Image (cartoon, rainbow, N blue to C red):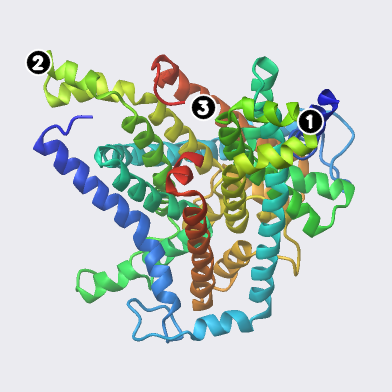
Amino acid sequence: MTRGSAVGRTIRGSATAVAFALIIVPILIVVITAFSPGDYFEFPPRGLSTRWFVEFFRLKEMRNAFTLSLELALLAATLATIFGTMGALFLARRRGLLAGLLQSLFLAPLVFPTIILGVALLLLYKTIGMPVFPGLLLAHCIIGMPYGFRTVLASAQALDPALEEAGQSLGAGPVRTLFVVTLPLVWQGVVSGWLFAFIVSFGELNTALFLTGPGLTTLPIEIFSYLQFQGSQLVIAAASTLQIALIVVMVTAIERIVGMGRIIRAR
Amino acid sequence: MKRAWAWALLVPPLAMTLLLFVGPLMYLFWVSVHEASPSELYGHAFTLHNYVEVIGDSFYLAIIRRTLGVAAAILGCCLLIGYPVAYFVALQPARRRTYVLLLLLFPLMVSNVVRAYGWVAILGRRGVLNTSLRELGIIDAPLDLLYTTEAVVVGLMTILLPYMVISIANTLSTLDRRYEEAAQALGAGPVRTFLHVTLPLSTPGVASGMLLVFLLTLSAYVTITLLGGPRSKLLVSMIYDGVTAFQWPHAAALAFVLLALALMLTALILAVLRPGRVEGTGR
């Protein structure tokens, strides 16, 4: 990379300033609005208050949506990571056409238009009579699986095969080798995969849009229907801020556990 | 024993992917080539009518054109703003680069509905922009900024911009400096060096950024609905409307038209940029 001319520097600097403003300002406005004391949207707010957060936890449907999203993200991330880890450990040492095909298949939900997956799953669920919660859980599991798969695959491929062979030559069976040798060595991949799957499930819209049912709604979909049918009440800003706060906690956790370089590469 | 163990690792994730990803899509396709039924999810007779209805109807063709137009505008803006930002990021020292990339990654983790709400708060009739302009005395009556195609473009563009920046920055920061130094030693100015060396070498990042932004634009129903309202519907809105009206074969056909668009445009982007010809960089 060369630093180039002054013109180049000016273009890069101003584009960066504009881009960060466009990306960050809408999020900041939501967070600041959430602390406003008034009844209606007003920016900047006239004071500071937590009344909309109190209101959020007083509204039953909001509270339920928040707990459902949390439960769903915890379970879906765990299932997705287990399945993704299995696939990754199977493929880590395999080459060839079939291995390549399987890898693309496991990564496919990452780039596939999720809205189509949502429609397809709703159709299937309607045909077989699937209840709402397990249906949502399985959908988020499929969407989260590529994250666990990818992070564990990267860790497992960087692993020295001699270590696993040593475990087996010392008499450990494949199951013991997995739990005593392999998993402790790839755990950072497992953990960051889990955290990514959690974050994705917690904010997911495109399948939840179709798969949530009456009385059983995730937080993002609850926010969406409020915005669509009841106007932008300020309790939505509080709900959004809680969504953001949880992500901040998760990102900090990833940073503490596995370091930031890995987060960037995992994406 | 070892063989059985390997199968035990493969079968659960494979079964899951086949049952909940490949299978449902095949079933959706099956439904899309059957006629509608008033009582069942779909009728018994095979038909291509659902596809003919979409491709042969000027209403749907206009929607497809608008979808492609919006996607092109978003891609263009993302590339125009994203490339210089990625260049800026790639020039930072390694440690600071990680921080900047993290700052770009964080908004991607916030739910799109929250980020779209931020734009509603800015562009609405009582939003930040209209109130500021009125207080400054520039306008008398609030402008209708929300529920326009432009609002969709601006909102989605900023929501997806980090993908473009991160993709390009990752390629640019692994680029071998000696290529650019060689070009300049041979007498090329900064502009020529950029156009003939840096830009072609960064095509893998540009291609993956464009693909991500394009594919995510196609299925961004919530953002499109909140910012575009009922008048700026795109193809994805038609799919949703079809599902809520229980027109399953029709909605299924629309979904596969969307998928076909996604595949065609993916092929086009890859054919034009040919990221594979750059060796040693990118994925």
Image coordinates of residue B1 in percent, x first then y, are 86, 26
Residue drawn at x 79%, y 37% as measured from the top left: A175
* Secondary structure of the residue carrying numbered label 1: loop
**Residue A246 shown left or right of residue A109 in the figure:** left
Q: Are marks 1 and 3 on the same chain?
A: no
* Secondary structure of the residue carrying numbered label 3: helix
* Residue B229 visible within the image: no
Q: Quadrant of residue A90?
A: top right
Circles 1 and 3, Cβ within 8 Å, touching? The answer is no
The image's mark for residue A171 is: 1
Residue drawn at x 43%, y 35% as measured from the top left: B209
Disc 2 target residue: B187
Task: Check disc 3 and give the amino acid type.
Answer: Thr
Residue drawn at x 70%, y 34% as measured from the top left: A87
Task: Classify 10 Å Cα crowding around label 2: few (below 14), some (14-19), many (20 and above).
Answer: few
Front residue (pair A69, B146): A69
Task: Check disc 2 and give the amino acid type.
Answer: Gly
Please name which of the two marks, 3 or 2, marks the residue nearer to the observer: 2
Disc 3 target residue: B266
Image coordinates of residue A91 in percent, x first then y, are 67, 27
The mark that comes first in sequence, 3 or 2, is 2
Task: Check disc 1 and give the amino acid type.
Answer: Gly
Which chain is disc 3 placed on?
B
Q: Quadrant of residue A172?
A: top right
